[in-house]
Image (spheres, helix red, strand yellow):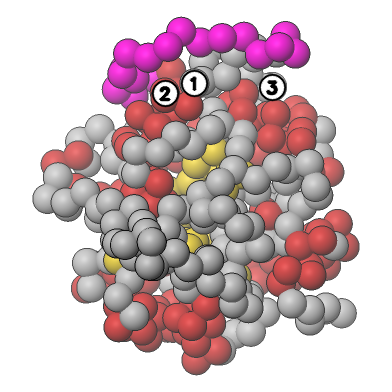
Amino acid sequence: MRFVVPSETVRKGAAIAGAVLGLGWLSGLGAHTAASTRLPPPALGRPAPHLAAGWPAPPAGPLRSRPADGSPAAPTTHDLAARLRYTSWPRGAATASAARPEVDCRKAKCIALTFDDGPGPYTTKLLGMLAAHHVKATFFLIGGSIRGREAVVRRELAEGHAIGDHTWSHPQLSVLSDGAIRSQLTRTLGEIRRATGGGTALMRPPYGATNRRVAVVTRHMGFAQILWSVDTNDWRDRNSAIVAHRAVSWARPGGIILMHDIHPTTVNAVPKILAGLARRGFTFVTVPELFGGRSLKPGQTYFDGPVPRPKNPRKDVAPRPKGPGASPHAAAGTPVSTTGGAPPGR
Ligand SMILES: [Zn+2]
């Protein structure tokens, strides 16, 4: 049984949606098993392992302060912004990306394509399509799917895409214990590091199911929570024309589009999506590029990035357009409180 309701309505009923959509995700992934993983949680107060090793030193900034609640100090936003610039590029891959000029999404009309739940059997085909059009995207990876496809993950990075942590077995994090949340993220991070030699400071909670506890754990681990502003519902509607139409017509400047590279119908929709969005004047960016030098706070939830500044503020101040797939959050790039319940997702 499935619900078919507008996405903004679903955002408010995430607990139900999570349970229902969980079945959809599992069926979509085929043989994937939801094995529980119980790795020992990293000790808080020490730098998260992926942040401690291998990353360039953050620029000099203010001293870290201890939060008022006595919890260990999280990385400063300044630190995270510095690390995000390197999220896409593990050591040795920097030269491959050097030719790409920096995009300023406060000036350009940017859009971030994101693909979840891979790597999968169609990811290589997708990478070929993206490379043919020099388009960069962001992949949120399932740790349990990386083994055997390490070369695909390395290729994602080598070709300039960004990657993020999408947990080990795709559970609804908001109902797990803190230790289980950490384990889901840590284990996947280990696989990413094993495959690529680098880490990531981006994560996406499965189904978009996040809450205050997920925010606290991800803050301590140094992850920004990246949600989305356009949900193509490609997991439900396995129809390339429908998926392409939604991605192209619901896109707004600064938007983050949610898709899944485990569905062949989605991958086959990509050429139309690229052509349609290019025709609308969008510049394709990775999630780190979308936020540029902005400070992404660990633990905070982001639904979209900045919008271009109007050229003439007196004449051209328009409210953020609203559409069927548009974010319900008014301020572009503004961190959203995670206390109001979990939005839906896949
Ligand atoms: Zn997912």
* Mark 1, residue position: 76
Q: Are marks 2 and 1 in contact (CB under 8 Å)?
A: yes
Q: Nearer the viewer, residue 188 or 84?
A: 84
Q: Please tell me which residue lies in front, 332 or 9.
A: 332
The amino acid type of the residue labelled 1 equals Thr
Q: Is mark 3 within 8 Å of ligand 1?
A: no
Query: Disc 2 designates what residue?
Result: 79
Q: Residue at x 35, y 29 (%)?
A: 82
Amino acid at pointer 2:
Asp
Is residue 62 located in the magenta-colored stretch of the structure?
yes
* Mark 1 C-beta closer than 8 Å to ligand 1: no
Mark 3 lies on a secondary structure that is: loop
**Contact (CB < 8 A) between labels 2 and 3?**
no
Q: Residue at x 48, y 46 (%)?
A: 164
At x 46%, y 53%, the residue is 305
Q: Residues within 10 Å of mark 1 (few under 14, many from 20)?
A: some
- Disc 2 C-beta below 8 A from ligand 1: no
Please state the horizontal and vertical placement of residue 219, each as a whole percent of the image.
Answer: 61, 28
Q: In 3D space, how far apart are the residues under numbered discs 3 and 1 (Cα atoms)?
A: 25 Å
**Where is residue 317, by image quadrant?**
bottom left
Q: In the shown orientation, is residue 142 left or right of residue 113?
A: right
Residue 192: image location, x then y, percent: 45, 40
**Residue tagged by mark 3?**
40
* Residue span colored magenta: 53-70
Q: Disc 2 on helix, strand or loop?
A: helix
Of 66 and 200, which appears nearest the observer?
66
Give the camera-side residue of 184 and 17: 17
